[in-house]
Image: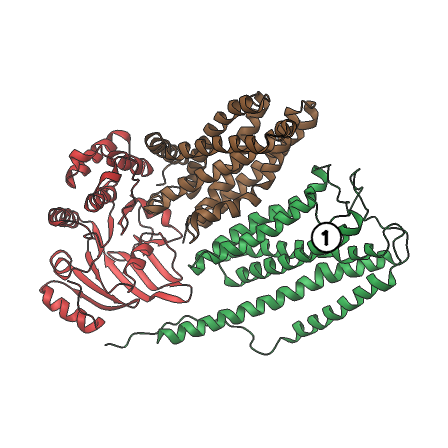
Chain colours: A brown, B green, C red
Amino acid sequence: MTTSFLQTVLAIVHKDVRAELRSRELVGSMALFALLSILIFSFALELNRIAREEAVGGILWVTVAFASILGLNRSLAMERDQGNLDAMLLAPISRAAIFCGKLVGNLVFALVVGLLLLPLMTLLYNRPVLQPWLLAALLLGALGFSTVGTLLATMTVQTRARETLLPIVMLPVALPVLLSAVRLTTSVLAGGAQEDWLSWLQILAVVDVIYLVLCFVLFEHVIEE
Amino acid sequence: MTALPRTDAPLPAIETRPAPRRLTILTVVTILAIAFGLYMALGYAGTDVEQGNVQRIFYIHMPSFFGAFFAFGAAVIGGIQYLRTRQDKWDTLALAGIEVGLALSLVNLVTGMIWARPIWNTWWTWDPRLTSAAIMVLTYAAYLMLRNGIENPERQKRFAAVYGILAFSTVIITLVIIRIRPDTIHPAVIGPSPQNAQGTFELQATAGVGAALGINFIVWSILVPWTLVWHRVRLENFTQRINALKARLLDT
Amino acid sequence: MPQPSNLTSSSIIETRSLVKAFGLLPALRKLDLSIAKGEFVALLGPNGSGKSTLLRLLAGLSKPTSGTLTIGGWELPREAAAVRAQIGLVSHRPLLYETLTARENLRFFGRLYALPANTRETRITEGLERVGLAKRGDDLVRTYSRGMQQRLSIARTLLHDPHVLLLDEPYTGLDQDASLTLDGLLTEAHRDGHTVVMATHEMDRAVRLADRTLILARGSLVHDAPTAGMDALALAAIYTDITGMASAR
């Protein structure tokens, strides 16, 4: 009697994308924030060209992390404000499918912003940020942020402090993702040998898998009373 | 107005005597052990050849990190068990574990800073391990903030359990960061230190060092967190009982 | 429809010693209740008496602190998955997406209930017509008035044709016309054999629509009687007597 997992995930993703295509509030604010962020970093590090070029990896990932937080808050607030999470919980669907649906939606939005960032940073910071291995890094990094973020944002939108709490609880937990993604990006940009940085990609993938499993299991506990 | 039935919610059953005997014994043993540990660290163990007396702080610095590790670990167990059974006692254990872990990781940070002043010539440096230890402390501070931000008590416990489990990842990162960030200057405690580690934690062949470390490890990693968690759990039980009594009064 | 596993009587909803507490505050105190299949029950009581809490428990949205609750023989919340498709809830809040159109909202929920695409579309069109929103179906819900959102919310609840309808003050925010439409929908649902549990403050509606009236006060059931032969004034008198408060309307 339960609606199939895949069908549920697709329905939720379809709904989120449809709402986003109409309002463009979420990706719009994320992209604008990301653009401002890299410009501000660029100005802040203007005096020192070398520092700026070396900091590209860090700037990229800090920007992606904060932009994700912005999007996650909006995405889950949309489920909470009108009580829609209840409407989903009423339906004969698996709780884990709700998590996956929201996760895929959030990941898509984060990737859209990330894909905008890569060419922009290539232009503004004069480093070859747009390259295949870094696309893989972006995919895995954004997946890590979206995974912990979807779980934690579902929690924080149900608290008194709402939006302000998400960065505080999410950034430390996302640290393993941030750390390995920055190391990977920096070594790839520094032109290091593949065997040097491939392990970072592996660590990133392992961290993603651990978080996926954990959040998948824990999600049920943050939505049911 | 018709008389309405009163709530039959049971009061949390707890020990109301001054303190259970086993806890009293444990507390006394811990206090004595701290004194003995300090004697071992400050008097019995020989002075380090390279670093001099400042090295003695290590006898508390390292064990207190593992004390925090075990306390945070207890919080993970409490969290998992709470989610499975929904019994309040597990949430109390998790909360106690995190508060005690937080206190011990502050001991760890402060002793580390005192050690670093003469050895690295600075109180604080943005070294990966120091940074990740600081982030670990902040994560658990965020845990307390999240807890305070939720009014519904049942939801508060559930969310706290979930976050307590996830937050442990920062503890693991702090433990393993020396291996994955080779640029740290923090010496490794177990196994070879990174090449550019400055100052060492390797045990010199001075007399009594092993014994002093062993005793202090037992004191700060096991006895101190155990005693503190037990007291904290008891305190929380009292608080809950008071709240239950208050609710019962208001209800009539 | 799931076959009830151990249906003993004609009752579809059964609670035994049902307790729900928020922390130490009890919202429902040992509630024993049995509602027959096809019955229309009105749930009265002052604010904070536990009406919404009871409806949320029946909808499987929250878990009881103690006691048991079965719907169609299935125990909630353990076997909730088996009955979810049979339950519909109209809540205080509209439970709709403001950035989607009415039709898109219904389509989304239709997909969650696994309605086949062609049935879904006909149901959506019918539903919009029934609540009088056929012409506004492609407008964003954001542009709707409170009453229109409430009507759409009712269409959402009826979309999967649930056997048990739970309504939490559904008349709030509805104008005269919409209230009459809802009256019609509920009467129709009742006639078709659906079980309806409706929390409300309106005595006359309770008497007119329901078979049976329950009054909750401070989490306990203090009155339980059939409405047949009773008028709104008599019910209001009982209500005032029991709760010590003048009835809302």
Horizontal relation, residue C104 to residue C177: left or right:
right
Q: Nearer the viewer, residue C143 or C25?
A: C143
Residue at point 41% right, 32% down?
A: A27
Label 1: chain? B
Horizontal relation, residue B251 to residue B53: left or right:
left
Locate the N terminus of chain A by quadrant.
top left
Residue at point 20% right, 34% down?
A: C137
> Given the image, on which type of amino acid does mark 1 rest?
Met
Q: Nearer the viewer, residue A39 or B13?
A: A39
Confirm whether residue B80 shows in the render: no
Image spot of residue A216 (x, y percent): 49, 42
Residue that carries the numbered disc 1 in the rendered image: B113
Q: Is residue B231 above or below residue B184?
A: below
Image spot of residue C124 (x, y percent): 22, 35
Image spot of residue A105 (x, y percent): 42, 34
Name the image quarter holding residue B43.
Answer: bottom right
